[in-house]
Amino acid sequence: GENVEQHPSTLSVQEGDSAVIKCTYSDSASNYFPWYKQELGKGPQLIIDIRSNVGEKKDQRIAVTLNKTAKHFSLHITETQPEDSAVYFCAAFKAAGNKLTFGGGTRVLVKP
Amino acid sequence: DGGITQSPKYLFRKEGQNVTLSCEQNLNHDAMYWYRQDPGQGLRLIYYSQIVNDFQKGDIAEGYSVSREKKESFPLTVTSAQKNPTAFYLCASRIQKDQPQHFGDGTRLSIL
């Protein structure tokens, strides 16, 4: 089955700096890659997603890039703010499998 | 206001007891999912259902059971066979195969 690895597991950045989280997936048939943000005691919230026919997608301070050949995708957060502190999860979806496979999560701490 | 409602927010189980976690959605989504999240870990799939009266085992189904009698409801029963039930349980739903999953705010289950 699909395997998604996510790095780093924790990330501490100074407010205003950029944060980058990287994920690799194993199944080349995966074609949809969402990113979720989870705050303490809450369910994950979708923040951005990308499909396999696109290399990059941007939404204000967040962007995601996808390299299908290398089977990795990354989340970029620019101009980080304290409210960006949370756990972020990447995931990969394969239509044939009909389910998402999640990475292990990255705890991001933005220091004021 | 559409969304996914999980109840209760906190639940306590005695040894040898079955407990049922509720998940209701008014998004008219076809597919529903149950995940387990352990502290500092990613999300692991327990069961999922793509249509009423049908469901499939996920990666860690042992000790759990589900039903899908109505489109909007997908309750999860944690049986006494689940020896380590303490975790945060998340329910999710989506409308189509490669569309985003939306999550509820979870139920935290603890053993008395």
Image (cartoon, rainbow, N blue to C red):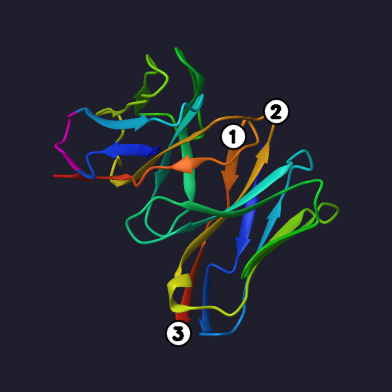
* Residue appearing at x 86%, y 53% in the figure: A69
Where A90 sits versus A82, above or below? above
Q: Chain of mark 2?
A: A
The kind of residue tagged 2 is Ala
Tags 1 and 3 both on a single chain: yes
State the residue position of label 2: A96
Magenta residues (range): B11-17
The numbered mark, 2 or 3, whose residue comes first in the sequence reads: 2
Inspect the image, locate mark 3, and give the three-letter code of the amino acid beneath it: Lys
Q: Residue B74 at x, y = what percent? A: 37, 25
Q: Is residue B35 left or right of residue B10?
A: right
- At a point 53% along the width and 82% down the height, the residue shown is A13
Q: Secondary structure at mark 2?
A: loop
Disc 3 sits on a residue from what chain?
Answer: A
Q: Residues within 10 Å of mark 3 (few under 14, many from 20)?
A: some
Rendering coords of residue A64 (x, y %): 69, 61
Residue at mark 3? A111
Which dot marks residue B98? none
Calculate the distance from the C-alpha at mark 2 to the C-alpha at mark 3.
42 Å
User: Which chain is indicated by disc 1?
Assistant: A
Distance between mark 1 and mark 2 Cα atoms: 8 Å
* Disc 1 from disc 3: Cα separation: 35 Å
Of B70 and B48, nearer the camera is B70
Give the residue drawn at x 38%, y 43%.
B104
Of all residues, the one furthest to the right in this rendering is A69
Lateral position of residue A49 relative to residue B93, left or right: right
In the picture, the quarter occupied by the C terminus of chain B is top left
